[in-house]
Image (cartoon, rainbow, N blue to C red):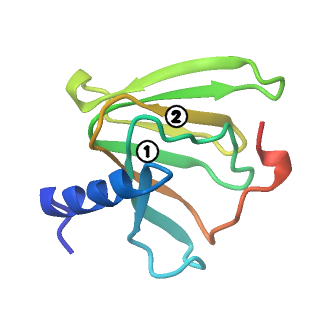
């Protein structure tokens, strides 16, 4: 499979049409896969709650557009803010396991490549701030 403008445009169109203003395009074979690899098309206004993944680190690579990633401590206080934008020469961010975080989408048409260890594990209440 080629990851090209045509695929990014397709997933972006689905994100724009989605109530959540985002759409995943999974590259892994199943939710049980040891590596969860996906494209995530994100539009400004999408809401990603502050959360953490206790058992796995997570990496975002921005293919187009830009995002602001914010880290938090367990007292709900921001501890770091990072602009991720290929136009600025800042292509991705690695989020350590257990780090509370969220992101803000800064440009329409933003698509990230996201990787974390599998299998897929739904967030638990204690993993949300």
Side of 3 where 45 appears, left or right: right
Q: Element at badge 1?
A: strand
- Residue at 25% x, 32% y is 86
For label 2, the residue is 103
In this rendering, the count of numbered labels is 2
Q: Which mark is residue 60?
A: 1
In the image, 92 versus 25, the foreground residue is: 25
- Mark 1 residue crowding within 10 angstroms, few (<14) / some (14–19) / many (20+): many
Q: Quadrant of the C terminus?
A: top right
Answer yes or no: do the residues labelled 2 and 1 have beta carbons within 8 Å?
Answer: yes
The answer to whether 65 is drawn above or below residue 54 in the figure is: above
Instruction: Tell me residue 81's x, y (percent).
Output: 53, 19
Q: Quadrant of residue 18?
A: bottom left
Instruction: Tell me residue 122's x, y (percent).
Output: 71, 63
Q: CA distance from mark 2 to mark 1?
A: 10 Å
Instruction: Tell me residue 109's x, y (percent).
Output: 27, 43
In the image, 93 versus 40, the foreground residue is: 40
**Labels 2 and 1: the sequence-earlier one:** 1
- Observer-side mark, 2 or 1, equals 2
């Amino acid at each position: 499979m080629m990851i090209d403008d045509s695929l990014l445009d397709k997933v972006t169109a689905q994100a724009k049409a989605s109530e959540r203003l985002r759409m995943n395009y999974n590259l892994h074979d199943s939710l049980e896969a040891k590596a969860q690899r996906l494209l995530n098309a994100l539009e400004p206004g999408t809401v990603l709650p502050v959360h953490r993944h206790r058992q796995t680190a997570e990496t975002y690579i921005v293919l187009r557009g830009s995002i602001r990633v914010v880290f938090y401590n367990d007292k709900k206080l921001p501890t770091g803010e990072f602009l991720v934008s290929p136009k600025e020469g800042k292509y991705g961010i690695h989020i350590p396991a257990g780090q509370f975080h969220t992101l803000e989408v800064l440009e329409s048409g933003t698509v990230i490549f996201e990787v974390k260890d599998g299998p897929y594990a739904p967030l638990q209440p204690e993993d949300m701030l």
